[in-house]
Amino acid sequence: MQNSVVIPIYNEKECVWGVYSSVKKVMEGLKESYEIIFVNDASEDDSWLELNKVVSRDSLVKVINLKKRSGESLAAKAGFDAACGNIIISMDGDGQLEPKDIPRLLTKLKEGYDVVCGWRYERNDPWLRIASSKIANIIRRIMIGEKIHDVGCCLRVYKRECLAGIPFEGQFYRFFTAFLFKKRLKITEIKVCHYPRKHGVSKYNLHNRLFSSLPGFFYIMMYKKRNF
């Protein structure tokens, strides 16, 4: 298996078919073997029903149904663990990212990089979310030394071996790129499209993310002093 696309889903029933169709079209165009893995993070809507319809029609699609809400971090890990591809492609399932950018990320990866991250250069989100993310990105570049502009963009491609040893528990996933830099991997980024949300509601909560991320931030800072 060449490529595995991992897409966590939480209460995105309106987005499932659109995301699936656009991802499948792009992956077929690559003329490489692939699989698409949806991870249903115990959605409370009918996301699971739509996902089951997809998997019943397409043998290249897998669905992992988590029994209880685990959060983006462990949902992503469940998909990564189940993936068979040498290259792992991650993205959100809310329809705001453009699967057509995937070939560009893969082309960049083949230039000798270990990880290629998407950069939502023209981001279409509420202003408070954009402003808080920009501030957080600047602080992280200064304090942690991450050399990318958009640490929150989930559209990324990785060589499979790069994911080994990365902690996913709790809020550590928010510092995923920091751990990748710690491993001395060759990482770059490219600008990708970002669309306004058409369906559902954002799961973003500024207050919860700010305070829940503090333990991970201090953990990374300790690692930075010892190992970075």
Image (cartoon, rainbow, N blue to C red):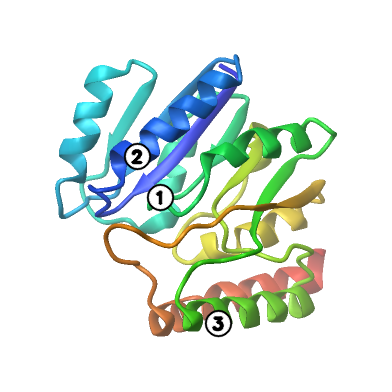
Q: Three-letter amino acid code at disc 1?
A: Gly
Work out whether 212 lies above or below 10: below
Q: Three-letter amino acid code at disc 2?
A: Gly
Q: CA distance from mark 1 to mark 2?
A: 7 Å
Image quarter in which the C terminus is found: bottom right
Q: CA distance from mark 1 to mark 3?
A: 22 Å
The residue drawn where x is 61% and y is 37% is 102
In the image, is 111 to the left or to the right of 211? right
Q: Which mark is residue 95?
A: 1
| Marks 2 and 3, the one that precedes in the sequence | 2
Occupied quadrant, residue 150 = bottom right
Element under disc 3 = helix
Work out whether 65 lies above or below 213: above
Which of these two is toward me, 28 or 219?
28
Element under disc 1 = loop
Image quarter in which the N terminus is found: top right
In the image, is 161 to the left or to the right of 47? right
Q: Which mark is residue 18?
A: 2
The residue drawn where x is 54% and y is 57% is 194
Q: Is residue 164 visible?
A: no
Q: Which mark is residue 132?
A: 3
Q: Position of residue 225 (x, y in %)?
A: 80, 74
Q: Position of residue 83 (x, y in %)?
A: 48, 29
| Marks 1 and 2, the one that precedes in the sequence | 2
